[in-house]
Amino acid sequence: MSLHSSLISQEKLQYLELLSQKYPTIQEVCTEIINLQAILNLPKGTEHFISDIHGEDEAFYHMLNNCSGVIREKVKMLFDNKMSQNEQAELCTLIYYTQEKIDELREKGVINDEWYSTTLLRLIEICKLLSTKYTRSKVRKALPKSFSYIIDELLHANNDENINQIVYHRQIINTIINIDNAESFIIAMSELIKRLAVDRLHIVGDIFDRGSGADKVMDMLMNHHSVDIEWGNHDILWMGAAAGSRACIATVLKNSIMYRNYATLENGYGISLRSLFLFAEKNYKDCKDVYEATDHCIAVLLFKLEGEIIKRHPEYDMQDRLFLDKIDYKNNTININGTVYALNNAYFPTIDINNPYELTDEENTILTEIQEAFSNSEKLHKHINFLYANGSMYKQFNQNLLFHGCIPLDENGEFTKINIDNKILYGKNLLDWFNVAARRAYFLPENDKNKEFYRDTMWYLWCGKNSPLFGRNKMTTFERMYIKVPELIEEKKDPYYKFCNDKNFCQKILKEFDIHYPNAHIINGHVPVKVKEGESPVKADNKLIIIDGGMCKHYQATTGIAGYTLIYNSHGMRLMSHEPFTTRKDAILNNTDINSTSNMFETEVERVYVKDTDIGENISNKIYDLTLLMHAYKDGTLIPSVEHQI
């Protein structure tokens, strides 16, 4: 292809003029081309995929620390013939929980100068191994500032160096120990190891609900060096609550009360439930305790709020979710599609029979108070802003398609066409529209006339019959609470979950998102994989991977394991299945790790390099532009800077 600048368009020439400000000489252009070309030929960085954390902060923290077993593998690779299994386990625990492990070993009297020296040398070896995938410049950027020069020196010390260099590097370690800086240095080295072990973290949805530490998980993600988040239905629920949707707020409260999980709301975000508990205790006196009373109280509030949304939006086609006007309050029954069912709990003290979806004044006051608490929680909005800045409905990354739930389909396997906002949407366009709508729900000012419409959309994404995040035909909260008839409780999955077992169908989905790479994959979370029933997380001849295996304790009895994670490095893809995590204390005291099984289900014929990735494509484009700039300098189209010339 010709690069003559005479063929450059005026628009491109203007871009090159801007580029020349950063690279004002031919030599600087050439140097950058050489640097970028070298990066293209490095192995691709390791990607780590996790989904459905559901507030299990301790298990997530451990998985983040051990990188789903990657660090343990590196330790074994380097030291299997030099250290016992127990010594390797202790070194891994030190990397995972550095300060706590040092404190524990100090109490045992293990720590001395020899321990410091041996440990530092081992950590340096691990860092050296992990840094081979990166340019020296990128490693330097990852170094903790207070130790950057020293670590840089030690990482690039070679065993075959002359005696003077060996003495020099050994003296650095001795000095670190002699000036009582070894502990801080070990902490810095351990953080660097975890930083280098994973180049990119993908969270494929559902950080919130069930477990008690979603706020702690968000803090960890905000401190991570490179993360993207594909929103799950539980994430969008909290985002909707933060945006001011009363239905989303009521659902967050309902979930928290149902799972007896108040820590995230009250301790994490400073949102008190006291007024709700007092109101429930006063009005729902027939319940056995305050928890049952509050559960019924918030459920009724939720059904009222949902009813108003459904009536506002007939296009949602969710009229079958309207129950409060179908109840015979005198006979304690409900008529659903012509069949009368007895209610197992017919205590509705706050419902006006003539206007069942209307809030009482006191209900409205309590909701307003809690809504203001959501609005005023600084930490909540800090986390929600992070979800918006680093999240989306889906992600295309390195020719893989990541989304939490499904692409809605009809029974024939065709994309479901949905009329929303007077638009017929389906497939990629549907997710793109929801992506914009979710942002407008939060960022539009309160006085914007469209604010309520987009807030309602957040609730629809949580439980709507064609929501790509929900993936079921209905959410049977009412039936499970008040009727408990098996055929009414069933929530039918979207046909996506049937067709996704077919390779050709998965190719159709990838094509819809303009992904044509032969080894591309779809990566989902959302639906727990029932391993103990023989279900496989890898489907459609390796085209689709579902990585929700049950990190949430609530699901582990069903799944039989404690979650799947996915590792994608330059050699291929590995699915990691995990046994349940014990406790952080047990991990520190007994060096227990999450026992994981690795399944290398797809091996690359040739090693994958940066040039084969999305980042590589961007770098190649930059090399092309720099080459154009170099030719523009050489043929006089642009004049290089004289003062920068050597």
Image (spheres, helix red, strand yellow):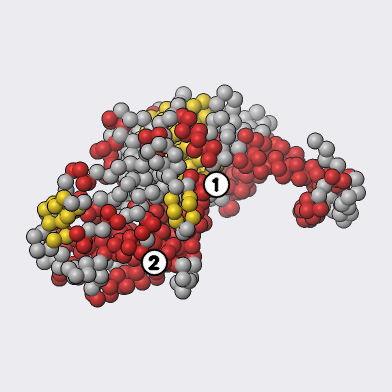
Q: Which residue is mark 2?
A: 244
Q: Nearer the viewer, mark 1 or mark 2?
A: 2
| Residue at the spot 45% in from the left edge and 42% down from the top edge | 415
| Whether residue 435 is situated above or below residue 129 in the rendered picture | below
What secondary structure is found at the residue carrying circle 2? loop
Question: Mark 2 or mark 1, which is nearer the start of the sequence?
Answer: 1
Q: Give x and y (percent) for residue 44.
A: 59, 35
Q: What is the three-letter code of the residue carrying label 1?
A: Ile
Is residue 241 in view from this perspective?
A: no
* Percent x, y of residue 92: 42, 37
Q: Residue at x 58, y 47 (%)?
A: 142
Q: Secondary structure at mark 1?
A: helix
Residue 252 can be seen, yes or no: yes
- Quick one: 154 or 359, which is closer to the camera? 359
Is residue 87 depicted above or below 494 in this figure? above
Residue 216 lies left or right of residue 631; in this view the side is left
User: Which quadrant would residue 72 be assigned to in this image?
Assistant: top left
Locate residue 54, reporting x and y percent: 34, 49
Q: Nearer the viewer, residue 497 or 538?
A: 497
Residue at the disc numbered 1: 176
Q: Nearer the viewer, residue 67 or 628?
A: 628
Contact between marks 1 and 2 (CB within 8 A): the answer is no
How far, Cα to Cα, is label 1 from label 2?
Answer: 53 Å
Q: Disc number at residue 326?
A: none
Q: Position of residue 107 (x, y in %)?
A: 34, 46
